[in-house]
Every structure is written in structure tokens, then in C-alpha cells.
Amino acid sequence: MITTDICIIGAGPVGLFAVFEAGLLKMRCHLIDTLPQVGGQLSEIYPHKPIYDIPGYPEVKAQELVEKLMEQIAPFHPGFTLGERVETLDKQEDGSFMVGTSDGSTIHCQAVVIAGGLGCFEPRKPEIEGLLNFEGKGVEYMVKNPEHFRNKKVILAGGGDSALDWTIFLSDIAERVTLIHRGDTFRGAPDSAEKVFELAQEGKIDLILQSNLVSVSGNGNLESVSVIGRDKVSKTLTTDFLIPLFGLSPKLGPIAEWGLNIDKSAIQVDTFDYSTNVERIYAIGDINTYPGKLKLILCGFHEAALMVQSAFKYVYPDKKLSFKYTTVYGVNEF
């Protein structure tokens, strides 16, 4: 059995930063994640994707951010249980919890923090004729290694940040990049959308708007994609790869059975300290919901900072919390 102060479910960027904030208050953390490595979606889905809204970093690759977070929390020596899913949560007579995993690991803690991003997630797959036949044979749902697409013809589909960012990034790597979107405006960041339109005007990418994917075909491997526009005119595009980027379908898994207030697969929290309706259980990052919620890593960092201030009373019930600034004391003084 592992004994710690706070058990964090989810080792993505928000869960990792929570370790730092807890460490400043001399609270130990142990993290559990179903993935075999830390980093959550950043490492698993888009490790090479550039991120633009982290303070102090005009641009940082997703995996680089994870590595920096690991470096930041190293002084606090967190524990990790990776490749295992949390299955059970048992409250003890003293209010603490026993957390059990799919492989039989047990963690005893004073507070539980759910930082599982979107929970157990899988990509949303569009209903396209023949799509499943070419998974792994030209149809990909994420970009793990951009070099895999070097000098290849790549078609991306979607209208969010991922579709825009990867269109921009792959335009310098692939032989030809085509972005297909069913609308004529994008849901992603305006700056990214503007850049995509500029690339299209310069002839560096092909941009097909007001169109939907219809089918895919090929002999063994993907060879072409059919699309149809609002004018009902269809066209066939030759390609080596199709990357549909329509988001992720979140699944909470066993967490859904813990008696938490849940709204559309997200956990409702009190914005005072990001606590749930169950005492000593908190939820931070993309997995929580509240009025005005923004699903940004930046916001998750803020939530983590406030959460640990509240969790302190369960770890040190007889101590008074004294807030200190790292700019004055430095990390080693905490």
C-alpha cells in the first residue's frame, strides 16, 4: 500500500502542476494514470503540437511543456502509478480514502483530486463510408510524429484548434496539405484561422470549405477521399493520409459511480476551491464544469493553485495555512 497526502487521478499537465502547488505547502502527492506515461493528452495525442497560451512561452511543443512540468515538480518527489485505471474509492472512518486500481495497487490519502482531462477518451469518428477499413492504413486520428507525414499528401478535416494548428504545422512538412471544413468560419483561435486563410491565398495549402467528407477508398491502403459541397457537387481527392479531427468522446469510467454531481460527462465543482459535492474530493482541469468554464491548460493551473489551499486543512488539520510567495522564498525554502 502507498501512503500519501493527496492522490491525483490524471497525470496530465494540470495534474502535474498540482504536485508543484501542493509541494509548496509541504503536501506529498501520488498520481495515477491509465496511460503508460505522464503528460495526458499532450503526450498521447499531440506531443509535437505547438501550444501558444502558456505564460512565458510564445510557443511551446506539448511534450516540451510536459518535460518542463516534470522538471518543476522533481524537488517534491511525487509518486506515480502509470498504466492503471482507478477502479475503487473507499472512504475510511477518519475521512481519508483508499484508492484502488485495476492492477491491484492501493493508495491511502487524505484528499483525492480528479485531474483526468476528458476522462477515458477516444476520438470522435465521423460516419464516413469505408473509414474503419483504413484505420492504420492511411486514416489517423492524431499526429504523434509529424515526420510520419513528410513529403506525403495529407487531408485534414475539422474546424477546431487541432485542425487549424496541424494544418499550419504540416504545411512545412507534407508534400501537400488540404483542410476540409463543413462551414466557412472556424471554431479555433482567430489568429490560427487567419494564418490558414493566408496559407491558402499564398497557394501553400488547399482549403475546401462548406464541404463534408463522404467516403474513403483505396486498394489496401488509403488512396482517395470523396467530399461533397453545399452545392451538391462532389469531388474525389487523392491522398496518402486522412486525419479527421472532430474532438474526443469523454468517458468518466468508474468515477461516474462515486456519487459526484455530473453534468454532460463533466464534474460540477464549487469555484471557491474546486471541490465536488463529496467532501475531500476535488476536480480540476477539463474534467470539471462550472459557469464560465474555459477548457484551457492555463485555467487548470489556476484551479490547481486554489484547490491545494483548501486540501491543506485535511492534510494538516491542526496547522494554520500561511501563504508564501515563491519570488521571496524560492522553491527550496518551502
Image: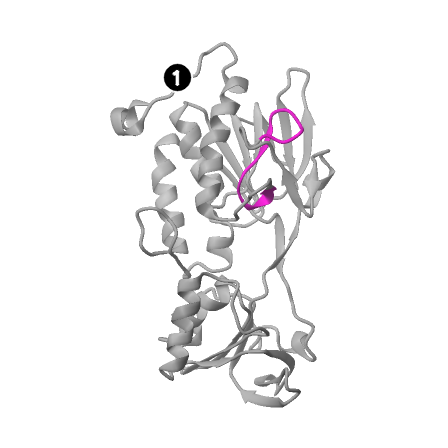
Query: For this rendering, which residue is in front, 49 or 246?
Result: 246
The furthest residue to the top: 318
Q: Residue at x 43, y 16 (%)?
A: 321
Query: For this rendering, which residue is in front, 78 or 166?
Result: 166
Q: Secondary structure at mark 1?
A: loop
Q: Which residue is mark 1?
A: 322
Q: Which image quadrant for residue 283?
A: top right
Amino acid of disc 1: Ser
Q: Where residue 307 sits in the image (x, y, percent)? A: 50, 30
- State yes or no: residue 282 in magenta: yes
Q: Is residue 204 at least partly visible in the picture?
A: no
Query: For this rendering, which residue is in front, 95 or 32?
Result: 95
Is 52 drawn above or below residue 273 in the view shown?
below
Is 296 drawn above or below residue 244 in the view shown?
above
Q: Where residue 29 sits in the image (x, y, percent)? A: 48, 30
Is 266 drawn above or below residue 175 in the view shown?
above
Q: Residue at x 52, y 47 (%)?
A: 294
In this rendering, would 231 be left or right of 79?
right
Q: Is residue 116 at least partly visible in the picture?
A: yes
Q: Where residue 300 sits in the image (x, y, percent)? A: 48, 41
Query: For this rendering, which residue is in front, 87 or 233?
Result: 233
- State yes or no: residue 185 in magenta: no
Q: Where residue 111 sits in the image (x, y, percent)? A: 57, 26
Q: Which residues are magenta?
A: 275-288
Q: Residue at x 52, y 50 (%)?
A: 36
Q: How many discs mark residues in the rendered view?
A: 1
